[in-house]
Image: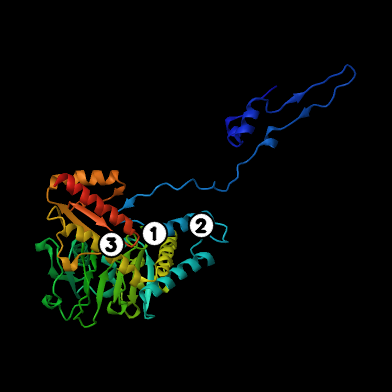
């Protein structure tokens, strides 16, 4: 009896084979019965001719045109890095597998995380007396981890608050120590940074905390305060300007940063900490937030964000190939100067609220003289393939984040659009 091929068997065939299978019986039977004696039945199994498709991925199609992404984070990544990651996605080197499939304790991933740390140390010239940790939880988790590791519940801690993130760090620290704000820019809508001589620090404080670059308000420290506490400990959240310029790491006790602004995808948090500050965590400190445990296990106490760390490593390689952070800073200054000049030459049509001396090279907030035009500005910019220009929900307006990976061409296109928009709406 003839049997039709099942839909499942047809899915495994190439189109030509499947079509042929659909036009014949699955088990063709030949019966030639002479009068004298029966002949054996010849059976041919359809499965024998089934062709399994090549498991290797097809060759990539022509590259789709990329837009200019001005998002604050997750943010634009270097095109060169993305293309290399694409080429290694299916099989990483001679491993026979993707980085996403590797054991975090195997030799392949060990080489990846060690190379990433080595390149980061070279970029920032990190002294050997500092540990480098690749963690999870974002910089927000470090708002708790820092006081839990560096002080006791009755210890005083100083915070300079120059924006929303500094304020959030302070509020979280209040749960674990006697945190206090020694200066706040809130009354002036976070548009400036204080003269350090005006900041009254507590000499008994365990550390002084700053947010080096406020992503939302676009305020950036161009120099850093000298901590006047006994330990001389300065702690900095550098999430949104990490690896955008050279930094003297020896001035800090702790530097922490979410990777998703300048050095990788979301999911990786980098902590650089002076080794003598490790090992004093409060008893209530969760094991995953204890710097001693993380350092002793080389960031591998549990499964880390392996692919994210791999991506960070590719970014570090790219920054080194560009000539290091001095060269990167030059490029960032050129982009920022071009954009800020457009504001200053617009005769008030575009306005940046930040005091010029502390304007961020990374996050550029601005408004329109006619606020009712802001939605139209964002809509028209998107049509020109420039996206994520809407300001943070807490402050409104617009914001252009021009991190390391934003090419000069992106800023040039934005400035040209701004001038055209002004000509049509002024």
Q: Are marks 2 and 3 in contact (CB under 8 Å)?
A: no
Q: Is residue 240 visible?
A: no
Secondary structure of the residue carrying numbered label 1: loop
User: Of label 1 and label 3, which has the lower sequence position?
Assistant: 1
Between marks 1 and 3, how big is the CA–CA gap?
A: 16 Å
Residue shown at the point (35%, 70%) measured from the top left: 327
User: Of label 2 and label 3, which has the lower sequence position?
Assistant: 2
Q: Position of residue 364 (x, y in %)?
A: 22, 59
Q: Which mark is residue 88?
A: 2
The quadrant where residue 72 appears: bottom left
Q: Which residue is mark 1?
A: 78
Q: Which residue is mark 3?
A: 335
Q: Note whether 237 is above or below 49 in the view shown.
A: below
Between marks 2 and 3, how big is the CA–CA gap?
A: 31 Å
Secondary structure of the residue carrying numbered label 3: helix
The quadrant where residue 212 appears: bottom left
Figure quadrant of the N terminus:
top right
Q: Nearer the viewer, residue 254 or 339?
A: 339
């Amino acid at each position: 009896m003839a049997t039709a091929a099942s839909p499942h068997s047809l899915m495994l065939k190439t189109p030509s084979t499947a079509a042929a299978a659909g036009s014949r019986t699955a088990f063709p039977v030949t019966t030639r019965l002479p009068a004298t004696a029966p002949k054996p039945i010849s059976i041919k199994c359809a499965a024998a001719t089934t062709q399994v498709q090549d498991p290797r991925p097809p060759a990539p199609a022509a590259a789709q045109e990329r837009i200019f992404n001005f998002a604050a984070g997750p943010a634009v990544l270097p095109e060169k890095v993305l293309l290399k990651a694409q080429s290694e996605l299916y099989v990483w080197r001679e491993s026979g597998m993707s980085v996403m499939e590797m054991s975090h304790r195997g030799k392949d991933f060990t080489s990846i995380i060690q190379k990433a740390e080595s390149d980061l140390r070279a970029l920032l010239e990190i002294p050997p007396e500092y540990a480098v940790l690749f963690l999870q939880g974002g910089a927000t988790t470090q708002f708790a981890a820092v006081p839990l590791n560096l002080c006791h519940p009755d210890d005083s801690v100083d915070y300079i608050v120059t924006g929303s993130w500094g304020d959030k760090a302070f509020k979280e620290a209040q749960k674990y120590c006697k945190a206090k704000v020694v200066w706040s820019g809130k009354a002036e809508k976070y548009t400036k940074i204080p003269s350090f001589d005006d900041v009254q620090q507590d000499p008994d404080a365990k550390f002084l905390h700053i947010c080096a670059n406020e992503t939302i308000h676009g305020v950036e420290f161009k120099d850093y305060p000298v901590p006047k506490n006994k330990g001389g400990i300065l702690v900095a959240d550098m999430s949104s300007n990490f690896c955008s310029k050279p930094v003297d790491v020896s001035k800090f006790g702790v530097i922490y940063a979410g990777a998703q602004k300048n050095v990788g995808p979301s999911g990786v948090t980098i902590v650089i900490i002076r080794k003598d500050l490790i090992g004093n965590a409060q008893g209530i400190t969760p094991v995953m937030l204890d710097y001693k445990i993380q350092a002793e296990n080389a960031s591998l106490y549990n499964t880390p964000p392996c692919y994210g760390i791999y991506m960070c490593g590719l970014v570090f390689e790219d920054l080194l190939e560009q000539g290091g952070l001095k060269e990167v800073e030059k490029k960032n200054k050129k982009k920022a100067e071009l954009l800020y000049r457009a504001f200053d030459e617009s005769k008030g049509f575009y306005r940046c609220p930040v005091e010029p001396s502390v304007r961020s090279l990374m996050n550029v907030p601005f408004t329109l003289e006619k606020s009712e035009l802001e939605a139209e500005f964002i809509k028209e910019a998107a049509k020109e393939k420039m996206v994520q220009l809407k300001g943070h929900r807490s402050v409104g307006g617009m914001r252009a984040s021009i991190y390391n990976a934003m090419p000069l061409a992106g800023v040039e296109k934005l400035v040209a659009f701004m001038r055209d928009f002004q000509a049509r709406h002024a």
